[in-house]
């Protein structure tokens, strides 16, 4: 039923819970898995030379964090004998990076977590999961923290 799972990770607690659910589904359906970490290369805003230095520093830290999260996810899937591909994706809007990757790898199920924010925190910080749900053209399994 689900031959190819897409699992966006960010190293958070909900992300680790997603991996556990994705392993169970991948084992049940003999699915292949693609793990991604989406980096917004334009998240840092600034002006002048401070911007250039800050942007490079931000991208370096974001890439290191992404590599760590992806490696942990890969190891978890591989420990269960599950075929996994992994990559860092750049996207100005995180949700678009997720959905574009889902389409490009022909994923038939997207499994992602949510931080369960409410009220003002959700309004200010937004929700990648909400945006994915609003725009997705494939089934999405949301694992709540």
Image (spheres, rainbow, N blue to C red):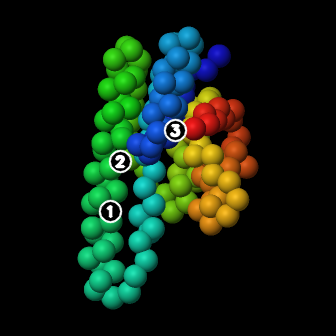
Give the percent coordinates (x, y) of residue 21.
54, 24
Give the percent coordinates (x, y) of residue 63.
31, 53
Residue under the point 53% across and 17% down? 24
Looking at the image, which is closer to me, 82 or 103?
82
Quarter of the image with the N terminus is top right
Q: Which residue is mark 3?
A: 14
Element class at badge 2: helix
Residue 50's place in the image compared with 8, above or below, is below
Q: Which residue is mark 1?
A: 59
- Regarding residue 100, the answer to whether it shows in the image is no
Task: Give me the C-alpha separation between circle 3 and circle 2.
Answer: 15 Å
Task: Give me the C-alpha separation between circle 3 and circle 1.
Answer: 23 Å
Earlier-in-chain disc, 3 versus 2 = 3
Give the percent coordinates (x, y) of residue 133.
70, 45
Element class at badge 1: helix
Question: Callout 2 environment at 10 Å: few (<14), some (14 to 19), or many (20+)?
Answer: many
Question: Callout 1 environment at 10 Å: few (<14), some (14 to 19), or many (20+)?
Answer: some
Residue under the point 28% across and 86% down? 49
Earlier-in-chain disc, 1 versus 2 = 1
Determine the residue located farthest toward the bottom in the rendered image.
48
Residue under the point 31% across and 44% down? 67
Quarter of the image with the C terminus is top right
């Amino acid at each position: 039923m689900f031959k190819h799972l897409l699992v966006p990770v960010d190293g958070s607690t909900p992300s680790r819970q997603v991996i556990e659910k994705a392993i169970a589904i991948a084992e049940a359906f003999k699915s292949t898995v693609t793990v991604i970490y989406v980096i917004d290369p334009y998240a840092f805003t600034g002006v002048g030379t401070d911007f250039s230095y800050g942007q490079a520093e931000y991208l370096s830290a974001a890439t290191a964090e992404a590599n760590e999260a992806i490696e942990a996810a890969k190891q978890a899937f591989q420990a269960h004998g599950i075929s996994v591909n992994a990559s860092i994706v750049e996207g100005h809007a995180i949700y678009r990076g997720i959905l574009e990757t889902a389409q490009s790898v022909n994923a038939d199920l997207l499994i992602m977590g949510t931080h369960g924010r409410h009220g003002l925190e959700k309004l200010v910080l937004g929700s990648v999961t909400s945006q994915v749900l609003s725009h997705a053209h494939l089934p999405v399994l949301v694992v709540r923290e």
